[in-house]
Image (spheres, helix red, strand yellow):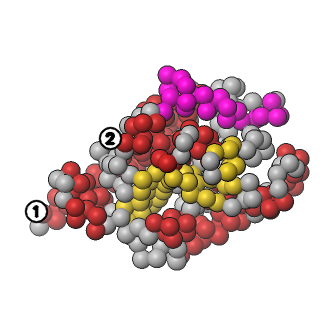
Amino acid sequence: MVGRMREKLKLIEAGDVSHGDSKLVVLACGGGLRGAFGGGVLVGLSQLGFRDVFDIAVGVSAGAANMAYFLSGQTAVGMSIYLEEMISSKFINPARLWKIADLDFIEHMIRDSPKSLDVNAVRRSRPEFYVGSTNIHGKGELINAKLSADMVATLKGSMALPAFYNKVTYVEQGGFVDGDVSLSLAVPEVMTTFKPTDLLIIMNRPFANLKDPFSFLQRMFFRLFLRTFSRDFRTAFFNKNEDHNRRLRAMHSGECFAGANVSLVCPDYEMPLFTRDAGEIRRFADSGTEKILAIFDKSVRNTEVQVTT
């Protein structure tokens, strides 16, 4: 994968149309605050100059915002939101039962603040950009974010955690909530829709880690806050951990990759989901940056060895 990315970038920069012989797709998965790891990976890819090497970029939930800031050239700005705004009580407040996670606050940061996303820069970037969201019927959809009239609303819909933020975000395609409900590991949809020759997957949990079933108390909590959602959506929500594990097992076996060249970047440990420790989040993000930089450095050293022998 590393060599193919480098070669494709050279062809793109040289204006050689043969770069189109391959289709390179990057998928950034979700995970709430754990998305800081994926943000860190994208910081590293940006430092390496790979912002425009991908043909198609896909982001789900936190991965959607990460990808948007990557495509706009603002990865450091996006990372600062994890380290500052997302650990503040303005965003997470367990005592605010009607809106434990205030996505309106994060929307304001992305839309109209010193940290706002440069939407025009995203639209000008080379890759096509798709956002994975869950519609009000519990089905996953990949939305072309560059064609969205309101890109920020499209990102918000993908991140809107049911029960923690009990609002549906409406865009021209319909009403949407957190993409992680239906597309936590959107590999089958990416493979079917885009048919990549090369796929880079950025996860925010260790590859071996399955999700536990909801506990009795969790199910009671979610039933209370999801009562206004449709039956189909509630069914999808309560099955989402099982669906995640099914998708992960298919990735373990390789059966879902359909002959594509696939690389995976994921953390070595699982960060607590609702930590407010900026230092812990920074270390988690830095581990993502260090991991992707090490992969490319190792590739360079291996190439050098091959040349000298």
Magenta-highlighted residues: 96-117
The residue at 42%/36% (across/down) is 120
Measured from the top left, where is residue 299 in percent x and y?
27, 58
What residue is shown at x 59% (from left), y 66% (from top)? 248
Q: What amino acid type is highlighted by mark number 2? A: Gln
Q: Which of 277 and 72 is in front in this view?
A: 72
Is 260 within the magenta? no
Question: Which callout, 2 or 1, points to the residue nearer the camera?
Answer: 2
Position of residue 149 measured from the top left corner of the image (x, y, whole percent): 54, 42
Q: Residue 51 at x, y = what percent?
A: 35, 46
- Residue 241 seen by the camera: no
Read off the residue under disc 1.
308
- Does the magenta segment cover residue 112? yes
Residue occupying the point 38% across, 52% down: 127
The image quarter in which residue 200 lies: bottom left
- Residue under numbered circle 2: 47
**Label drawn at residue 114:** none
Q: Nearer the viewer, residue 94 or 196?
A: 196
Dot 2: element: helix
Q: Measured from the top left, where is residue 178 in percent x and y?
A: 67, 49
Viewport quadrant of the N terminus: bottom left
